[in-house]
Image: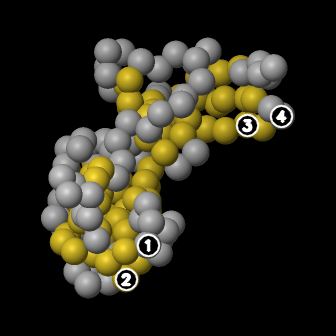
Amino acid sequence: MTSAVRTTRIGAGTYLVEHDGRNETVYVAGPASDRWVFWNGQVFRGDFRPDTPLTAPAAGPKAGAHGSVTAIVAPMPARVGSVAVAIGSRVRKGDILIVLEAMKMELPIRAPGDGVVAAVHCEEGQLVQADAALMDLE
C-alpha cells in the first residue's frame, strides 16, 4: 500500500511534497506539455501531475553504439557551472563530473559507473540544451 502524497505550491516552479513522513522540495520548469522536474538529485521530463509518482529519469547516461563509451548528457537546458574532471581522469561511480546551473539551483552530474574520461564536450560558462553531449566515459 502506498502512502498519501500531499503537494503544496510554495513558489514559482517550487513545490513541497509531503510523503512517508518526509518533506521534500521539487522544482518544476517548462510548459505543461514538456515539464522538467528536479527532485531528489534527478531530473524527470514529461507530464508532471502532483498526484502521480515520478518514476523515470528524463535523460542521463546513454551508451554509445558499441556499448564501450557512455555519453553523459545534459538532462535539461542549463549553464555549465564547473567541470570537475579532465580527459584521462579516472572516476568512480557517484563522482561529480560536472555541475550544471538551472532554475537558481546547482545540479551535479555524477558518474554512472567507474571509468576514464574519454572526452569533454563542454566548458565552464557554456549554455547547453537538453540532451547535449557533455562528456564521454570509457
- The answer to the question of whether label 2 and label 1 lie on touching residues, with beta carbons closer than 8 A, is yes
Closer mark to the observer between disc 3 and disc 2: 2
The residue lying at 33 percent from left, 26 percent from top is: 30
Nearest to N terminus: mark 3 or mark 2: 3
Determine the CA span between mark 3 and mark 1: 32 Å
**In-front residue for pair 100/9:** 100
Q: Which mark is residue 21?
A: 4
User: Does the rendering let one see residue 21?
Assistant: yes
Q: Which residue is mark 2?
A: 90
Nearest to N terminus: mark 2 or mark 1: 2
Q: Which residue is mark 1?
A: 114
Determine the CA span between mark 3 and mark 4: 7 Å
Left or right: 4 in relation to 132 = right
**Residue 69 occupies quadrant:** bottom left
Type of amino acid under label 1: Asp
Q: Which mark is residue 71?
A: none
